[in-house]
Image: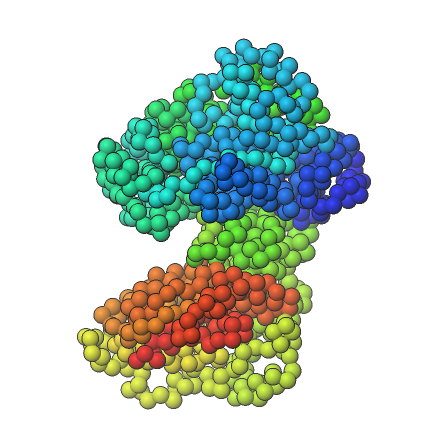
Amino acid sequence: MTSPGELERTLRENLRGEIDFGAAARALTTMDASNYRRVPVGVVAPRDADDVAAALTVCAEAGVPVLPRGGGTSIAGQATGVGVVLDLTRHMNTLVSVDPEARTAVVHPGLVLDRLRDAVRPYGLTFGPDPSTHSRCTLGGMIGNNACGAHSVAWGTTADNVTELAVTTYGGTSHRIGTGWAGTPDGLRELITGHLGPLRTGMPPGFSRRISGYGGLDALLPEHGVQVARAFCGSEGTLGVVTEAVVRLVETPRAQVLAVLGYADESAAAEAAAGLLPHGPLTVEGMAQDLVGDTAARLPRGGAWLFVEMPDEGAARALLRAADAVDRALVTDPAEQRALWRIREDAAGTATRMPDGGMAWPGWEDCAVPPARLGAYLREFRALLAAHGLRGSPYGHFGEGCVHVRIDFDLVSAPGIARFRTFSEELADLVVAHGGSLSGEHGDGQARAELLPKMYGPDLIRLFGAYKDVWDPAGGMNPGTLVRPARLDENLRFAVLPATPFAGEIARCVGVAKCRATDPGGASVMCPSYRVTGEERHSTRGRARLLHEMLAGEIVTDGWRSAEVAEALDLCLACKGCRSDCPVGVDMATYKAEFLHHHWAGRIRPLSHYTLGGLPDWLRLIARLRAAGAVNALARRVPVPGLDRERGGRLPELAREPFTRWWARQPGAAKEAKEVKGVSGSGGAVTLWPDTFTQYLNPAAGRAATQVLHAAGLSVEVPTAGPVCCGLTYVSTGRLDRARTVLRRTLDTLGEPAGPVVVLEPSCAAALRADLPALLPDDPRAARLAGAVRTFAETLEEYAPAWRPPHLDRKVVGQTHCHQHAVLGDGPDRRLRERAGLTGELSGGCCGLAGNFGFEPGHHEVSVACAEEQLLPALRAAPPDALIQADGFSCRTQIAQLGGARARHLAELLAEGL
């Protein structure tokens, strides 16, 4: 076999696309969304079909396997490989053409499904199959796995919606396949005609979700029309590389309506699902209480539910009348429909978290049985789980008998892995006994291919091997998958990790890749730097993969000193968006702080870590010297060391008088609650936290908050015995020991607050609520302070519920702070704005400044690009008289520097109204 160095040189000589055999590129592709890990030789991003053919020729001559890869969201391990990975998302990601009359589209394999759906929506068309990963999965990956999704009840699988494929095989030969034998490899027709008997009588009884193995092989029978493209779907990259596809489109129903049906339990819902099919539903999705959790309060009564989407309201009402459900609801509002569907779409991640905080894993994610057998199957499945002491929360496409579940396997210890194998074998027997398919949607990969003989028998398994050999005689395409497979209990990704808490956190990332969604719409924040760069290493998943490989030490070999990890984390804004938006709660901001803590231990850090990371100390010193004016004047002429020059190397202006100095000058009576019309007496005392930004940079927000809190009948206290600080800037620069020192000093200074602690700056409130107890887990004062922290709006809602804010009657635009979105939530803020007559929505996403990030050298371009996603367009589109709100100081600074406008804290807007 050719050496990696020689292979890389040869590929560079023959391809126009990128070739990367470096540690970072390999580390990013060791895993997909499964339990498995395989280390590739290198990564190639071909520019077109000619590049694909060249890569397959070079690799075949070198004897190196090839793995085509799209979004990397496969859950069975088929998107991991030991040879060269073809990244088809970098360049081969376009929509070639659309024919609205014929209802077809020509696509490249790396095109993300949602981009296709967006492009054909103006024609009233869509692509029928829609996996829950529709915002990041690719058409090539869907073809490889024969993906389905929620609407397959109406529109079928990917194989049902593909008419032609351009395929290049190992060695560089190109084929154009559709219906009939034209374009097929030599020997395929002879193979099929020589095995008509086994194909007609040996295949398990057909139902819509028979996805396992080469389950579409009977499409090559003459009575089925010799549908070669259809048979190719679901081959999981084992036969060749799809370079172009012609896909069918379907008409989008004009007014989908969602019927939500409540049932006593999961079995009742499962048994009812098949009976709903004659009503012509577009979807019949099922889930039970153990998956839905607290969201059940928004659903009809019951212990399990069916989400049934109908093409119009009349059909939906007829279904409701016919359904034998405990309770029912009709949802016509599109926004409410989207909110409910998000529960289902996030299930692949939320099902990974057990109620006690433990983790559950894929592996038996998508078995399917005929819908009429689903209720009985689920009862026996639950019993099998209990017999092995395992837990999982089934959900899925009940209308087609397809069940998704994540199970709390122990995939680290030898006994746990042995139980995983035994359970897998017994579950395969159970599925086959019910006439089902080991895979009903996502393919077999390494997780189930070893067990395919249970489903198909030895004759068909031999035919599968011969089928692969016709397409891939050298065996170079994704070896170890489907045919002559690897064992289901080898190559597990957890085996390489050390037994540490940090490693356990990194392992949380299961790879569902919601962070790779490129649409910044709505309130989602994750992952701003990926949306700007489009590079996997700048996604939350990519960073988690690099940290995983850093801990493994096989590819990334220099541990905490890793330059590859440092580079990837450099563009992490520490926005914490992943903490809330990632379905499994990956918290990359915390992981980044831990990495920087170790990475710079015992070394001189970047200058910005001292200037920006130590900002509270510097500002406190300047205030003590009463030198704010002199510093401001100097900063206008001399750039601050360690700050980005594209921002002028300047920090925002320092206030001449810190907030606590102003507070100390106020007469005692001014600090007490006043009798206010509509408020019965005092609502009690609150502690107003003098955070660094309010204290030294924007005391106006503190003064305004004091005025509003007094008006609401609350007494205000401000800590003045000494400096208090949340430690945020030290955490964000990875100076965790210093952060702990600062937080202990803060707790000593503050003592025990008598009531709520009002924190105006969202990033500081988030640090006190989340980072403080994590950094000082053994100090009970930390948990008490974290529990006392309230935002400005939370305080008014909880402690002055009868207060009526001034009615401003104005449109408002601006930015919701990303830490507020991720840690604190903005429900009380929305309600307070509504009561104050402030109409409109604040921008989601991230403003791009993100504390120290936007001021650090090399970050300006990304910072501006993040602001251009939502914030700056919203400001430009706002009417001239609109108020601009941004509770975060970083957000206000970004708006001032890039938008040329003055934003204010909500407290300031309300105080002005008073």
Q: In this view, does 593 lie to the left or right of 888?
A: right
Residue 466: x %, y % from top left: 63, 18
Residue occupying image coordinates x 39% and y 64%: 841
**Near-viewer residue (659 or 911):** 911
Q: Where 176 sits versus 586, above or below?
A: above
Q: Position of residue 518 (x, y in %)?
A: 53, 52
Q: Locate residue 156 relative to residue 553 in the image: left or right.
A: left
Q: Is residue 637 at all visible to an observer of this figure? A: yes
Q: Position of residue 907 (x, y in %)?
A: 37, 75
- Name the residue at 27% across, 39% down: 314
Quarter of the image holding residue 678?
A: bottom left
Observer-nearest of 66 and 724: 66
| Residue at screen point 28% across, 75% down | 806
Front-lying residue, 106 or 259: 106
Residue found 68% across the figure and 44% down from its top? 47
State the image quarter where residue 464 is shown. Answer: top right
Please determine whether, in this image, residue 677 is positioned above or below residue 667: above
Q: Where is residue 901 in the image (x, y as percent from the top left)?
A: 48, 75
Specify the quadrant of the image occupied by residue 463.
top right
Answer yes or no: is residue 388 visible.
no
Q: Of all residues shown, which one is farthest toward the front?
A: 101
The residue lying toward the viewer, choosing from 371 and 453, is 371
